[in-house]
Image: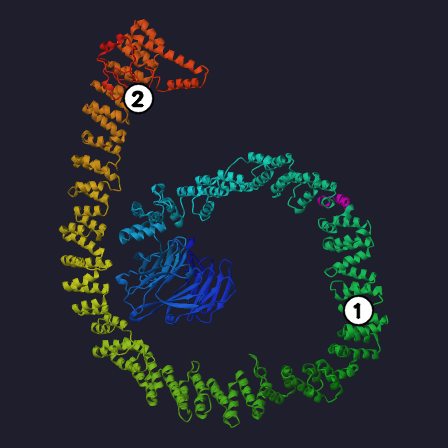
Amino acid sequence: MESDKWIVCVEPSQVTMIDLRNGAQVTRRPIQAEAAIMNPEQNILALRSGTTLQIFNLDAKAKIKSHQMPEPLVFWKWTSPSNLALVTASGVFHWALDAQSTPVKMFDRHATLGPNTQIINYKVSPDQKWCLLGGISAGAGGVVNGNMQLFNVDRKVSQPLQGHAASFATIKIPGREDAQILVFHEKKAEAPHEPPKLYIKEIGRDPSKGPPFGVQPVVIPVPADAAADFPVSLVVDQKDEVAFLLTKMGYAYMFDCHTGKTMYRAKVTQDTVFVTCPQVATGAIFGITVRKGSVFRLQLNGQALVPYIVQTLRDTDLALKIAGRLNLPGAENLFAAEFERLISSGQVAAAAKVVAASGNALRTPATIARFQQIPAEPNAVPPVLQYFSTLLETGRLNEQESIEVAKPVLQQGRLQLMEKWLKDDKLQSSEALGDLIMPRDAGMALSVYLRAEVHGKAIQCFVQRGEYDKIVPYSTSVGFKMDYSSMLSQLLFNNPQGALDLAKGLVNAEGGPLIDIQQTAEAFLSSNRIQETTAFLLEALKDNKQEHGYLQTKLLEINLIGGAPQVADAIMQQGTLTHYDRAHVAKLCERAGMWQRAAEHYSDIADIKRVFKNSHQMSSEFVVDFFGKLNRDQSIALLKDMMSRGPQNMQVCVEVAKKYHEELGSEHLVEVFEQNRATEGLYYYLGSIVNFSEDAFVHFKYIQSSCMLGQFKEAERVCRDSNVYNPDEVKEYLKGAKLPDPRPLIHVCDRHDFVDELTEYLYLNSLLQYIEVYVTKVSPTKTPQVVGKLFDLGANEDFIKRILMAVGTACPVEELVEIADTRNRLRLLQPWLEARVATGSTEPGTHNALGKIYITLNREPKSFLLNNMFYEPKVLGPYCESLDPQLAFIAYKKGAGECDDELIKISKTHGLFRDLAKYLVERQDLELWAKVLNKEEGEEEEPSRRQLIDQIVEWALPESTNADEVSCTVKAFMAADMPGELISLLERVVLQGSDFSDNKNLQNLLILTAIRADTTRVAGYIDQLDNFDAKDIALICVSDSHNLFEEGFSIYTKFSKPEYTADKEEQVEMQVLAIGVLVDFMKDLDRAKTYATQCDEKPVWSKLGKAQIEGKFPADAIESYINADDPSEYVMVCSEANEAEIFSELIPYLKMARKTMQENLIDTELIYAYAKTNNLTELEQFVTGPNVSNIQNIGDRCFSEGLYHAAKILFVSINNNSKLALCHIHLEEYRDAVSAAQKANNVSTWKQVCFACLRAEEFRLASTCGLEVIKYPDHIDEVVSYYSDLGHFDHLISLFEQGLGLDDAHIGIFTELGVLYTKHVPAKTMEHCKVFFNKLNVSKVVRACERARLWDPAVYLYMHDKQHDNALKIMMERANSWDNDLFLEAVVKVRNAELMYKAVSYYLEYHPDLFTRLMEVTEENIDHSRVVSQLRRSGPHALQLGQPYLKNVQKLNLSPVNEALNELYVEDEDYEALRKSIDSFNNFNMIALASKLATHELLEFRRISAYVYRCNKKWSHSIDLSKNDRMWKDCIDTANESGDSEIIENLLRFFCDSSEKECFCAALYTCFSHISPDVVIELGWLNGYHHFIMPFLIQTFRRTHMRLEALEKRTAPPADEKAVDEVAGTYGQLGGFGGMLMLENGGGMGGMAPQPQGGIDMSGFAGAQGMPQPGMMPNGGMSQPGMMPPQMGGMGMGMGM
């Protein structure tokens, strides 16, 4: 698994691929390979088989490249999608994917990564400049050592590292560029007891840029039960910058790459993890286990990480850093508290960094306001700018921050800074930000609007910047709708170019044009904008749609008619418009004199001919190209028309014919030229195409025209070089033309084999010199045909001889001889042939011809056949057979194998067997032998075959002295499967005395033939013969096909003697082979033992021992090996001895083996044998001495088999105190076990010893061990469980109480002791919780308290752990745990607000006397409306109980509170409190309250009802209620306050009707400003109240007089500046305070008049606004002297209540 995309599995006959990104889809391909890995990104598969590597592209189904490595691979991996890393035993190679290159060696493996190291990983840094190779190897004591090699590509140097896993990564470091780091695990082999460490260091940083990033090495917290564990993989999640470390035992560690701290540790699998890879998109990692092949996935849970660090790790600093960097929840309160602390202490910069690190938790407008409120120091940067600067360094500002930081920057005119921030994406764009920037830089504002998607304002910016072409694409892309027509109309008159740009954009909009093209064009045209119209239409019509044909025509027409034909020509030249009216445009072009365009657009040939009358004004290129647009008939007609006008068009017509001869046809074109008798034109036309034409007609016509124009050389060239013309036609034409130069005819006849006709033509036309020229210079090879024709024509022999002598050796001999021979003129050639031989000719044909002549003439033929080296036997042999068979045999024998078949045939036919036998022996050709010796299946024996064999055996072979001839003959007989004849032959040669009697090969062959054909003779041959290959013959004898074991044993035994084998080593070798026959083939171990005793040679004993051990006779084998002094098979011997349990016999063998070998297994088995035989003394001596045994393994083996005494000795020798302690346990040596455990100092050992001592009731020793175990939190539960199962609770508690005093006592000890107290000593629980709260796992202890029903400790723990909700629940649910102070402290800190309301109910029910105190505490946090609802549901007593609380919170003016209090006041008949409540807090249902009080039995409550109606402007209800209670003053004040003249008039009439004169007068006085004078006069007249209305009338006249006077002054023209001032003063008096009107000025003076005695009692409305006091005017002013009549003094007498 190279990535999160594929998993590849190699099976015996196929490769299976699992696509993880496609639902784990499985694909199987029939591919056989040892290994396969998939490219991390592409569907490219790399395969490995042995040293052969191949890479395939699965999508293209093609092999990309392959390579043969010089040595096997031990590891390979894709380091990137384009590079494959290959690791061999000696070095590391990189194989690039993108080129046909071979693997390039990067570096050699370091000595620390030797051949015994298993490579498990290889990494390459992101910048490709660092490589890291990692592997593991076996160390002492079963430890797995890790070694890594860090290589720098640039410097070509390596650095060894001790560790198991590492990885490269790139992380973001605040305040500088990204850093490339190396994260690696270190575990030093020389210090096995030191804990492993994690290193994080930056690599590749330029020293000139500052020190590199790095953290101090961090100790990795390895669990106590995983001391021997080691990492197998380290993967860095670059998304969250977290490192995952996975170990062999399945533990997963998670580290922070910035601090190196361990954030999490857990065991995620029980199986070994062997491969991992990151999932870059999510930050997760995938892994696969070894045995089960399970695929698992690990990913950081961001939601739970920070709470885990805070609550479990209790590392606030790490939590803040992680939460801020990854923007994770869970640290909001921590950030807020830290921020408040720093702000309070004036640390502005630090507070800003806290906000920046908090993610989005504190980045609110309130935070900005806090910084803005801090006063700036003199000459220092304002705090808010420091805040923004810090945020900009760490990331991007939000919308509000961007606006606030932009304001001062823009005021200072620092636009470059704003531009930089926007480019770096430091500001969040918004409409408000764009509005701030717009007045200063439209371009920058545009970029802001675009990012913020404020489309309308973005388009305004485009218009302002004149970028009209960008409006439409932008509007279309964002889907913004606008009125383009009006914008276009506006621009057309103001900015035509802008209008054009906009129009272009509108017609090119996605989804189709946004404007009508025709209307827009007409608009441009109506403004006489021809150029803009053309540009617009070109843009609009570029798609060349058929429906735009009219517009295309219009576009061309306005330019052709409008005086711009060159524009129209350019448009037509582009060819982008094709749907216009071509006929109309053609006419316009013709009128404009554009002949070429007119011709292009006409389709009728008549129109074209008319236009082409002006072809002289057209370019020849156009004319030629134009013909390509016409069909054949049109072209021929136009061509004829042009040629008929005279020779001036000849040249262009020839060019047309040249270019279009294929389309128009050569026949038609030739016809046109011939009709116009244009032979010269035809010649030039055909001359241009003849070299490329494949038309025979063209070639013939060209030859003909060349001859007609006297161009004989051209005719000769074509006749010589062309392969196309019809030779018969050309030949007949040339013969008929009788040219003065016959060379064209010569070439035609020569090339097409018309030699006879040519010879006849030249001979009959007396052109003999051309015959000689032809055969000597043109074609000498045709001389035989010419000579033959001359023979037939009866030419002169001297002429023929002269020709032959002139041609000489250039004439073919065979053909000429054949022609002469057939015409019986061969002897004519003898002088010519002898002349050729004299010149040194070696041609077989020449010598064959001479041979035939000599044999025929009998001129020493045998000498010629024997001595001539150049004739062909196959030619002369058959020629001689009819004349002399012996000459034929000689000729065939001369063939040296070429004529073997003919030679055999003639020998059989004429009885030449002796010659044939001698020839066969001399030839030494096995194939030839096979032809004469073999016979077909079913074929009868031929007498000639037997005669030939007899000649061979009796005469030919015995006479031979050549060993090779004899050998070849023997092989031939063997191949012919003739064993009887072969034996006879060999016995004749070997046994009967000859030169070859001692020949080893023949002796071997004789024995082998006997083995094959007659086994009874083998033993005799072995005894008689001494010079044969003993080893090979013996192997053949004992082979499965013959099974001649005794014969083989005899051979080995014979040749192991000194007389046959002188070399001692070879003798021993023969003895070993001999005993091998006995043990391997004959399986006779007893005979073999006897033979070994006789030989008494060590190799023989070794061979016997090997056979005995394989035969399961280990005791005998051990004896044999001891005799052989051979420890080589120690592995098998030890195995068989262990199986047979013969340890006593094994010990001597192992001692012997140790003398020559130092092997781990030998020493180990010797130790085991000592242990099994209970020979402890020798065991101890051996262990203490030098040895190479694996004591750890053998100790474990003895321990598992119960050999504890032996195991104890072994573990003591290697200081394995862990296992030593276990041995002491089994031997019941508990004190020694504790001592060994102290030395081991291993938690698992401590634990086992502790449990053993506990079982043995050795409590003190168990306590000693237990204290060491409980130091490790992971093992506390097991200790508690074991003690508890045995029932030793007191000892368990004592153990943990002692553990409190440990130096490294951890939270688990305190927590578990608290749990134990809850179970067994509940009285100590509370004290323990109070003393050690900070060291407890609160959640665990509190659960234990709840299970034990210890509520007080539970409440205490919840309170101090700030889990106030749970504390509150317990106190409410468990009465005996309630404490008022604790309850009040907790209730204001709960997170669940519902608990407050439960607390309200709880106090109402159980503690009503403390309810008010509860509400005082929760006042700021509780919903009072809901509390009032609770009080109402609880019953009437609850409201009474909560009255103090309600009064306390009434200041909030809440409707439910006001209503509840008002109800209580009514119930208590406290009208004063009710009136005060109504006046102060008006948020309640006043009408409902007024309706309720309207019928109250007490007058004051009914007055309050009227007052409430009055306050709510229910004037009629209030007055009616006051009337019923005769509260006249209330009636008058209500009417006056209403300002309604109708209500006041009705009240006045009511007073008149009820004869309340004083009230009537008081009403006139109070309501003066709202009463019409006519109503007053009417009522006074009707009721006789003249005296009562007089004050009203006087005041009315005074007011009228003052108004008129003021009006006159205001309208009078000003006399001077003084007058102006007076007028202004007059107006000021009218509107100000100087001219106070007594009855209607609303402002009141502060003066008070003496209160007269009597009058209306207004004390009930003392709190009403604007209520006049007795003795005062309505406005509070003083009464003026003489203002009121004397009668008014006693006015109040009759109005008393």
**Residue ID for mark 1:** 746
- Extreme residue toward the bottom, this view: 993
Quadrant (top left, top right, bottom left, bottom right) of the C terminus: top left
Q: Nearer the viewer, residue 1631 or 34?
A: 1631
Q: Nearer the viewer, residue 668 or 1569?
A: 1569
Inspect the image, locate mark 1, and give the three-letter code of the amino acid beneath it: Ile
- Is residue 548 part of the magenta span, yes or no? no
Q: CA distance from mark 1 to mark 2?
A: 140 Å
Q: Which residues are magenta?
A: 599-612
**Secondary structure at numbered mark 2:** loop
- State the residue at coordinates (22%, 20%): 1501
Q: Quadrant of residue 1550?
A: top left
Q: Is residue 1165 left or right of residue 386?
A: left
Quadrant (top left, top right, bottom left, bottom right) of the N terminus: bottom left
Please rate how many residues cluster around mark 2, counting C-alpha atoms within 10 Å: few if below 14, some from 14 to 19, many from 20.
Answer: few
Query: Contact (CB < 8 A) between labels 1 and 2?
Result: no
